[in-house]
C-alpha cells in the first residue's frame, strides 16, 4: 500500500516584534541575531537595537545622496562580521538597481571570507569585502576615488582617525563614527605630563592616571570634531544608545557643507598647544586655508 503523503506544511517562524517587516530571516540567523527557531536572546536583542538605532541616523543620509545622484557608495571600516553593512543592505540597498555599493573593510581575512560567502549566498551582489587596514584602503585601487558615506562603528584607537583620513581623501559627503578605545592622545599626555604640570592649573585635569585616560579619550573626540569642522563639515555629536547598552557610546555625524574653516583650524591648534599635544598635529591635520581665499580671517569673522 502507498503511504499517505505528509501534507503538514512547514509553519513560518513567529518572529519577535523587534524584527522589521521584510528582513531576511536567513541573514539574521547567519549573523546569530536570531536563533534557528526565530528567537532573540538578550545579547542579540541589544545588538539588533543598536544597529537599528544607527540605521535611523544613516537612512536619511542615504536618501539625500540618492536625491543628488543615482548610485550611493558606502564604506564600512572595521567591519568585523559586517552586522552594520548587512543590515544596511537588507533594509535599503537590496531594492536598488543603480550601481549602489557597500564596501566592508576588515583586516581579519577569515571574517572577510565569511562575509563574502554570506553575501553570495543571499544574493547581495552589491557588496564587497576587502582584507585591508583602514590606512591601506585609502591607497587601494579596489575602491572608487570618491565615496559618499563612510562609517566606522567601534573602530578602535587610531582606526577612527584613519577612517576620517580616508573620508577626507575620498571627499565623502557624510561620516558616521562611533569611536572606541582612544589611547594615543592619553599616551602623549602621560609622556609629557612632567613638563606640563607646572605650567597651568588646567593640568590638574589629567594629573592622575585614571583622569589621564578618561580626559585623553574626551580630548581625542574633541580634536576629531574640530578637524572635521576645519575641513568644512558640519558636526553633530550625540549618544548612540542608552548607557546601559554600551559605554563606548559617542556618535559623531559629519556632513560636508563647505563651511568656514579658519576658526576651527585655529581652535584645534590652540587646544594642541594648550595641552602639550603639538606632536599630534600631523594626525589631526587641517585643510589648506589658501584653498578658500575669500574666507574671513579670525579678526574679520563675526
Image (spheres, grey):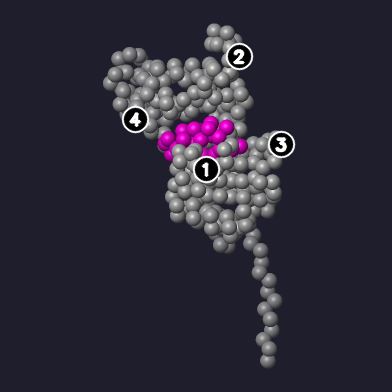
Q: Which residue is mark 1?
A: 141
Q: Where 71 sits versus 234, above or below?
A: below
**Image coords of residue 39 (percent x, y):** 57, 58
Quarter where residue 30 is shown: bottom right
The answer, for residue 46, to whether it is visible in the render is no
Per the model, the C-alpha gap separating discs 4 and 3 is 44 Å
Query: Looking at the image, do the residues carrying marks 3 and 2 touch, with CB atoms under 8 Å apart?
Result: no
Q: Please say whether residue 168 is visible from this viewpoint.
A: yes
* Residue drawn at the location 61% of the way across and 24% of the way down: 258
Reading the chain from its start, which is encountered first: label 4 or label 3? 3
The region drawn magenta spans 147-171
Most extreme residue toward the right is 67
* In this rendering, position of residue 285 left or right of residue 125: left
Q: Return the x and y of residue 72 as percentages of the image width and height.
A: 64, 41
Residue at the disc numbered 3: 67
Secondary structure under badge 2? loop
Mark earlier in primary sequence (3, 2)? 3
In the rendered view, would you say 29 is above or below 276?
A: below
The alpha-carbon separation of the residues under discs 2 and 4 comes to 39 Å
Q: Which residue is mark 2?
A: 294
Horizontal side of 34 relative to 223 (left or right) equals right
Disc 4 secondary structure class? helix
Which of the marked residues, 2 or 4, is nearer the chain's N terminus? Answer: 4
Mark 4 — residue?
Answer: 187
In percent of width and height, residue 280 lies at 40, 25
Badge 4, how many Cα within 10 Å: few under 14, some, many 20+?
some
| Separation (CA) of disc 1 from disc 3 | 27 Å
Q: Nearer the viewer, mark 1 or mark 2?
A: 1
First in sequence, mark 4 or 1: give its number: 1
Amino acid at each position: 500500500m502507498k503511504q499517505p503523503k505528509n501534507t503538514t506544511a512547514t509553519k513560518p517562524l513567529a518572529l519577535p516584534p523587534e524584527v522589521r517587516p521584510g528582513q531576511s530571516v536567513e541573514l539574521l540567523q547567519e549573523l546569530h541575531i536570531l536563533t534557528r527557531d526565530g528567537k532573540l536572546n538578550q545579547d542579540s536583542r541589544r545588538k539588533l537595537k543598536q544597529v537599528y538605532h544607527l540605521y535611523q541616523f544613516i537612512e536619511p543620509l542615504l536618501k539625500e545622496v540618492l536625491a543628488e545622484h543615482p548610485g550611493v557608495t558606502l564604506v564600512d571600516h572595521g567591519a568585523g562580521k559586517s552586522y552594520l553593512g548587512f543590515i544596511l543592505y537588507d533594509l535599503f540597498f537590496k531594492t536598488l538597481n543603480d550601481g549602489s555599493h557597500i564596501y566592508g573593510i576588515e583586516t581579519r581575512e577569515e571574517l572577510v571570507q565569511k562575509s563574502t560567502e554570506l553575501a553570495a549566498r543571499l544574493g547581495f551582489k552589491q557588496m564587497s569585502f576587502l582584507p585591508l587596514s583602514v590606512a591601506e584602503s585609502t591607497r587601494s585601487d579596489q575602491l572608487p576615488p570618491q565615496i559618499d558615506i563612510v562609517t566606522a562603528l567601534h573602530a578602535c584607537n587610531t582606526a577612527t582617525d584613519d577612517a576620517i583620513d580616508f573620508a577626507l581623501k575620498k571627499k565623502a559627503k557624510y561620516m558616521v563614527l562611533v569611536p572606541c578605545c582612544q589611547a594615543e592622545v592619553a599616551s602623549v599626555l602621560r609622556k609629557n605630563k612632567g613638563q606640563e604640570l607646572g605650567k597651568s592649573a588646567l593640568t590638574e585635569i589629567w594629573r592622575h592616571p585614571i583622569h589621564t585616560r578618561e580626559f585623553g579619550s574626551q580630548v581625542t573626540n574633541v580634536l576629531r570634531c574640530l578637524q572635521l569642522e576645519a575641513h568644512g563639515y558640519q558636526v553633530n555629536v550625540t549618544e548612540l544608545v542608552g548607557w546601559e547598552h554600551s559605554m563606548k557610546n559617542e556618535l559623531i555625524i559629519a556632513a560636508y557643507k563647505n563651511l568656514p574653516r579658519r576658526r576651527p583650524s585655529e581652535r584645534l591648534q590652540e587646544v594642541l598647544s594648550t595641552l602639550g599635544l603639538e606632536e599630534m598635529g600631523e594626525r589631526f591635520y587641517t585643510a589648506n586655508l589658501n584653498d578658500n581665499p575669500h574666507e574671513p580671517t579670525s579678526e574679520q569673522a563675526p
